[in-house]
């Protein structure tokens, strides 16, 4: 829990600091237990990867503390095998190897998550190739200084390969196990069968003696395709685990005399094992990194497509809104009004609810324009539109600019009285704005309205409905303006001009 929290925070907490040297020490013991031959040849040296993984995982935070802790553990682990001076020097070489790897990775901007192929290649060159080689050259000097009779380059090569392979198989495993960014595994039946097959094959290989079972050659190389398949199907965590387990088991077969590569001299057997582990790691971890990179690119691509789609939808909405809006007043335009009227007409016909329409025209607007100028006229149109919007705001109602200084309102009204009352209120509201109009008999800007109400049925048509409201508006103008007139029942009862049919009810 605490470890998980400090991993989440990206800062090594006290529990991590406590466990790190213990884990490092345990890795030393594990290496001695299964990866050092009785002739003292180290096939893979795991512990250096512990510090490297910690530095990468915590992005170098509290690096001096982490280094000091693992250094102490390294010296303590080396002491029984070497004198204290030699133990100190060899631990120093180990630390330098890890720090060089980390510094090179930072210098060449390798992401510590090792999830892209280029990061993995940078890690491989910095750690297993360069830093481990330098450590091998330095450690060989120390070993010879303290009495080793093995040739210098043999010592250097052994150290290099052992350390390099340890970094190569153990660092990605520790990073994969401690990382949060790996997707949870969901195994299908086929996955289960593949895993079971790989484990059976591994068991067969690991139980073979002298690289054969009943005369049939069964060497660890048989597991290379299994590593590739696991990498393709199961991602970094399982692949790094598989690679580490197979590598350590192979090393252990050598240390217990099972001779996994047949009856070959010890020094050749170590080289074979190291070649095998290198190939296994490159195929397994290399493929897993490649797949993880492809998957994250695919996710990135999907994210971008989703983002673009959202942007397109947003601009489509904006365009639709612009298409439906009058540029001067910001209310619905004529096109939107026509669509809404058709829709409300159909709805009213379906439901049998009455539909009311008001046509509204600003009185003596030409004189207003002539007196105050076109700009002031525009302003007045905006104010009238705003006032109408304030007054008519039930769902389903609509205020639109019909054209010029003429507006139209679609509203739900119970009956003719109701429609007339609504028109009257609008007249009062506009006059109530008290917009001075020197050429109006009322002294202020006013509007006239014609309202029509209908329960449409099949033989009615919209054009006549509009015409009736317009005629009522004309009558309101004739009768002195600043007033509302209801569509004449006589007009209403005339035949529908377009359908050649029936008029208003
Ligand atoms: N400022 C401005 N004026 C407009 C706009 N659209 C139409 N007009 C003016 O509105 C005036 C309409 O004049 P008329 O049709 O003669 O009507 P009126 O002066 O309002 O007279 P009545 O309707 O009979 O009361 C014209 O002068 C047009 O130029 C506009 O978008 N902005």
Image (cartoon, rainbow, N blue to C red):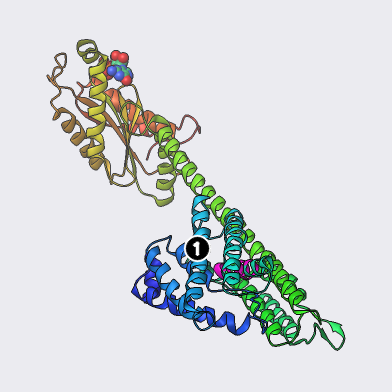
Q: Nearer the viewer, residue 180 or 399?
A: 180
Q: Can residue 80 be seen at all in this image of the molecule?
A: yes
Q: Is residue 453 above or below residue 296?
A: above
Is residue 50 visible in the rendered image? The answer is no
Q: Quadrant of the C terminus?
A: top left
Left or right, 21 with respect to 212, comes to: left
**Which residue is tagged 1?**
96
Segment colored magenta: 160-172
Report the quarter where the N terminus lies: bottom left
* The one of 309 and 148 positioned closer to us in this rendering: 148
Which of these two is toward me, 134 or 207? Answer: 134
The residue that appears at 38% across and 64% down in the rendered structure is 64
Q: Ligand 1 shows up in which quadrant of the image?
A: top left
Secondary structure under badge 1?
helix
Where in the figure is residue 477, as x and y percent of width and height? Answer: 25, 21
Query: Measuring 67% from the left and 82% from the top, which residue is drawn there?
Result: 37
Quadrant position of residue 268: bottom right
The percent position of residue 185, horizontal first and vertical second, equals 57, 72
Determine whether 373 is above or below 149 in the image.
Answer: above
């Amino acid at each position: 829990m605490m470890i998980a929290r400090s991993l989440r925070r990206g800062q090594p907490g006290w529990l991590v600091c406590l466990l790190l040297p213990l884990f490092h020490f345990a890795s030393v013991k594990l290496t001695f237990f299964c990866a050092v031959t009785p002739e003292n040849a180290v096939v893979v040296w795991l512990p250096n990867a512990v510090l490297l993984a910690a530095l990468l995982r915590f992005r170098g935070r509290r690096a001096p503390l982490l280094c000091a802790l693992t250094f102490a553990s390294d010296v303590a682990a080396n002491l029984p095998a070497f004198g204290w001076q030699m133990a100190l020097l060899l631990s120093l070489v180990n630390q330098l190897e890890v720090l060089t790897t980390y510094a090179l990775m930072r210098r060449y901007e390798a992401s510590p998550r090792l999830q892209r192929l280029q990061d993995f290649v940078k890690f491989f060159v910095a750690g297993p190739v360069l830093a481990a080689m330098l450590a091998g050259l330095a450690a060989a000097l120390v070993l010879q200084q303290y009495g080793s009779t093995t040739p210098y380059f043999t010592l250097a090569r052994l150290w290099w390969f052992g350390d390099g392979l340890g970094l190569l198989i153990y660092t990605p495993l520790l990073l994969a196990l401690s990382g949060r960014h790996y997707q949870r595994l969901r195994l299908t039946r086929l996955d289960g069968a593949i895993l079971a097959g790989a484990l059976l094959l591994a068991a067969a290989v690991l139980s073979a003696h002298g690289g054969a079972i009943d005369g049939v050659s069964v060497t660890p190389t048989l597991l290379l395709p299994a590593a590739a398949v696991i990498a393709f199907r199961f991602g970094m965590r399982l692949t790094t685990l598989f690679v580490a387990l197979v590598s350590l088991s192979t090393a252990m077969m050598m240390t217990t005399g099972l001779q996994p590569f047949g009856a070959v001299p010890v020094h050749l057997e170590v080289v074979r094992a190291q070649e095998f582990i290198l190939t296994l790691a490159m195929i397994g971890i290399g493929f897993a990194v490649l797949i993880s990179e492809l998957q994250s690119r695919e996710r990135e691509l999907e994210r971008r497509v989703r983002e673009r789609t959202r942007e397109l939808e947003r601009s489509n909405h904006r365009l639709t809104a612009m298409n439906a809006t009058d540029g001067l007043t910001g209310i619905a335009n004529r096109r939107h009004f026509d669509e809404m009227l058709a829709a409300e007409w159909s709805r009213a016909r379906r439901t049998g609810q009455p539909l009311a329409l008001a046509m509204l025209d600003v009185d003596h607007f030409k004189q207003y324009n002539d007196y105050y100028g076109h700009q002031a006229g525009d302003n007045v149109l905006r104010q009238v539109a705003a006032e109408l919007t304030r007054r008519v705001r039930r769902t389903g109602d609509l205020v639109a600019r019909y054209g010029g200084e003429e507006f139209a309102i679609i509203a739900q009204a119970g009956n003719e009285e109701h429609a007339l009352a609504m028109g009257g209120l609008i007249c009062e509201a506009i006059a109530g704005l008290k917009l001075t109009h020197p050429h109006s008999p009322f002294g202020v800007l006013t509007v006239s309205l014609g309202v029509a109400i209908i329960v449409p049925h099949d033989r009615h048509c919209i054009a006549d409905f509009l015409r009736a409201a317009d005629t009522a508006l004309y009558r309101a103008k004739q009768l002195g303006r600043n007033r509302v007139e209801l569509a004449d029942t006589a007009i209403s009862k005339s035949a529908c001009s377009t359908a050649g049919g029936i008029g208003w009810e």
